[in-house]
Amino acid sequence: MSEKTVTELENLILEIEHRIEDLESASLKDNFDRSTEIKYLREKRERLQTRLCSKLTPYDIVKVARHPLRPLSADYVNMIMDDFMELHGDKRFGDDKAIICGLGRVGQEKLLFVGQQKGKSTKERIACNFGMPNPEGYRKALQKMKLAEKFHLPIVTLIDTPGANPDIGAEERGQAHAIAENIYEMCRLKTPIINIVIGEGGSGGALGIGIGDKFAILEYAYYSVISPEGCAAILWKNAENAPESARALRLTAKDLLGFGVVDEIIPEPLGAAHKDPKAMGDMLKTYIVKYLKEMRDISITSLVENRYNRYRKIGKYLER
């Protein structure tokens, strides 16, 4: 029997899930016990999901990070935060829905939350520009982060963007300057900052809210200077070479941990975050609370100095 491809395994898992749903529905209707068969199918699904995860290529992982059912920043706000109060606007142009900012609590920890949002329905995705922030989004984020600094509140940012908006309007309103200013100011903010990539971490769009003291990434997220398709279009003039460029970019969580770009990989439920959003939310909450406790006893002076040194060390190279 030949080894099944990723697509074949996905289809087989989907068939089993539909079969489980049918059996559960039938059991409720006729009150007949089918628990043994359901248990067998669930165990088979788990085995197939384990096989599937072991076969994922870098480009498969990019596809998982883009999965339409994958939890977004707004989902995590609802799952892990209490007393959330959203803050709007950049005081210059408007309120960019591609970035969510707000005050709230994770457990007993008060903090400022900043997250990139893609939207779910077609209407939401258009309103959020498919998760590609505009300059006003980055300026909004920076203003709220300075507010957090003023009131000695830690900052948690969730990164999930294919990249910053590259259109003419965004460039006219100072896209590059807004991102550069955020990077500069976040390096100096006198408050703890936690960055977590929950899906896509694309280019300067991710860096605009991605400077901090602790940098983590979800198991099936990616973080890269450019998308695989963009890289393929530049190097080969053909987006069909995206799988090859994804391998060359070394953009997976394991690659990034090996390079020292990320501090930790946050595990996802079997089959990835979209298979069990609640379990993923609980896991994310646990790690955020852990990171906040780790930084509680570090002086602000040491925190900022360590943050600066952290980014100075990234990007090693050899000279001949």
Image: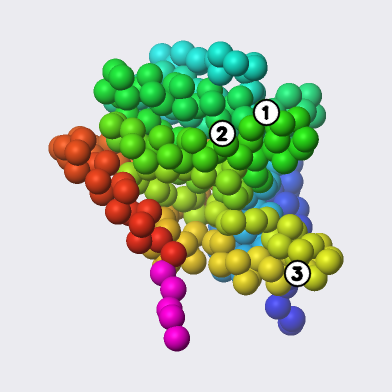
* Residue located 65% across and 66% down the image: 246
Q: Is residue 240 magenta?
A: no
**Res. 178 mark:** 2
Q: Is residue 307 left or right of residue 33?
A: left
Residue kind at label 1, given as amino acid type: Arg
Q: Is residue 197 left or right of residue 97?
A: left
| Crowd rating for badge 1 (residues with CA inside 10 Å; few <14, some 14–19, many 20+) | some
Disc 2 is placed on an element classified as helix
**Res. 173 mark:** 1
How far apart are the two marked residues, 2 and 3, measured between alpha carbons? 28 Å
Disc 1 is placed on an element classified as loop
Residue that mark 3 sits on: 235
Q: Which residues are magenta?
A: 316-320
Disc 3 is placed on an element classified as helix
* Residue located 73% across and 52% down the image: 14
Measured from the top left, where is residue 140 in percent x and y? Answer: 53, 23
Decide which of 13, 89 is in the foreground and name it: 89
